[in-house]
Image (spheres, rainbow, N blue to C red):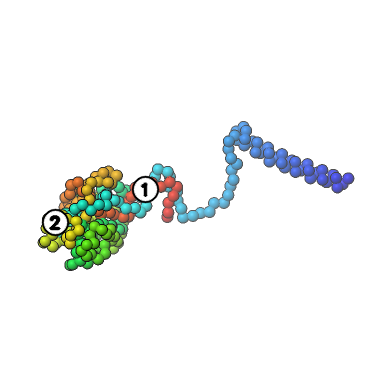
Amino acid sequence: MRHRGLSFLVVVAAASLVSGTTSAAQKLRSGPGLGRKPTVNLAKARSGMRNVPPGTRAPNVVGTITYDNNIPFSREGTLAVPIGNKFDNGFLDPHSINMVSFRLAGCFQTPYPQQRVSIFDVNAGTVMNLAQFSGGGACSSGTSGAVLRTAMLPAPIVGHVGPFIGAVFNTNFGGCAGNTGIGTTCEGAALSVGGVDPGMGFHAIRVGNSMSTAQNLGTRNAIFRSTGDNLPVELMNFGVN
């Protein structure tokens, strides 16, 4: 009898436990708890991630501004001036510039083994040089527009605000004056026809001999891109510290 009584108590206790669990679940299915899921509290591990609210533009995302259609069309025939793009669309403020890429309309190894690249600030119509450096790899005839060249800035330009110009120095060889052809030995940035950037604008520009003025080159874009923390990329719940 004691054995049967103990079994009876175990059965009753188990039934009570099941009954209590069912009752709690029923409270979530009906009454004020309708449709809600039970809350489970778990320890949360900390990480190096930070959430960016949906629809927020994150300015700390590395990207490349591309205005051209990647088809070399012509060269600017002016001697000894920087030719490139005025970057005034497709980035956030502040932004950084740490690398450029470009195609050449012409290429010749002497007297400059690599291309001379410049970055200019544009402020209230004036142009101020921010960086001058060589890059893009060795140059030789026949390797002009076929090669997309890259050049790292010696030191990244960080925290820049507003438009800027990135350009390649046109050759100063007298025989290239007025030469607008593609694939010659007359060094200079290749120009494309039309606008393919978000604003469908034209950005090709010539910086004057004084390095303080600039002139738009009409309905063309230079095949010259800028890379850095400057593209308006939309992130959802993602970020890297």
Residue 51, horizontal then vertical, whole percent: 45, 48
Residue 207 seen in the figure: no
Residue 77, horizontal then vertical, whole percent: 14, 55
- Crowding at dot 1, Cα within 10 Å, few <14 / some 14-19 / many 20+, comes out as some
Residue 57 lies, with reference to residue 116, above or below; the image says above
Q: Quadrant of the N terminus?
A: top right
Mark 1 is on which residue type? Val
Residue 198 lies, with reference to residue 150, above or below; the image says above
- Residue lying at the far top of the rendered structure: 31
Q: Give the mark nearer the N terminus: 2 vs 1.
A: 2
Residue 207, horizontal then vertical, whole percent: 17, 54
Residue at image point 31% right, 58% down = 98
Q: Secondary structure at mark 2?
A: loop
Residue 238 seen in the figure: yes
Viewer-closest of 196 and 227: 196
Residue 13, horizontal then vertical, whole percent: 76, 43
Q: How far apart are labels 2 and 1 at the CA level? A: 39 Å
Mark 2 is on which residue type? Asn
Q: Is 1 placed left or right of 124 in the picture?
A: right
Q: Residue 233 has which mark?
A: 1
Q: Residue 179 has which mark?
A: 2
Residue at image point 21% right, 55% down = 190
Q: Quadrant of the C terminus?
A: bottom left
